[in-house]
Image (cartoon, rainbow, N blue to C red):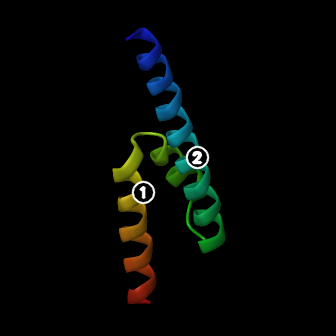
Amino acid sequence: MTALAWWLYILIAVLLFSQALWIFFDARKRGENPWLWGLLGLLNVPSSLIVYLLVTRRKRKSN
């Protein structure tokens, strides 16, 4: 059981870090604030990405 928990923590850390990096680079490419979005991407795995996609894509369509 402890080995499973150890691997689960590693998996969550990798997912959070890769999500934050992707959001950071995409925000930089789109002219958003990359540091803010990258830090928000470190909070939790799926919902930060969903919020980022909804906010940046909706903002882009309204211009």
Relative vertical location of residue 16 with respect to residue 29 in this rendering, above or below: above
Judging from the image, what secondary structure is the residue with disc 2 in?
helix
Residue displayed at 36% across by 60% down: 51
Residue annotated with mark 1: 49
Of residues 62 and 23, the one drawn nearer to the viewer in this rendering:
23
Residue displayed at 41% across by 87% down: 61
- In this rendering, the count of numbered labels is 2
Q: Which of the numbered marks, if any, corresponds to residue 8?
A: none
Local packing at callout 2 (Cα closer than 10 Å; few below 14, some 14-19, many 20+) is some
Q: Quadrant of residue 8?
A: top left
Residue annotated with mark 2: 18
Judging from the image, what secondary structure is the residue with disc 1 in?
helix
Q: Is residue 52 left or right of residue 26?
A: left
Relative vertical location of residue 46 with respect to residue 12 in this rendering, above or below: below
* Image position, residue 37 (x, y; %): 50, 54
Of residues 35 and 21, the one drawn nearer to the viewer in this rendering:
21
* Image position, residue 22 (x, y; %): 59, 56
Relative vertical location of residue 12 with respect to residue 35 in this rendering, above or below: above
Instruction: Tell which circle, 2 or 1, labels the residue nearer the N-terminal end.
Output: 2
Residue displayed at 50% across by 23% down: 7
Distance from disc 2 to disc 1, alpha carbons, whole Å, reads 11 Å
Give the quarter of the figure containing the C terminus. bottom left
Residue kind at label 1, given as amino acid type = Leu
* Image position, residue 12 (x, y; %): 47, 33
Q: Is residue 17 left or right of residue 1?
A: right
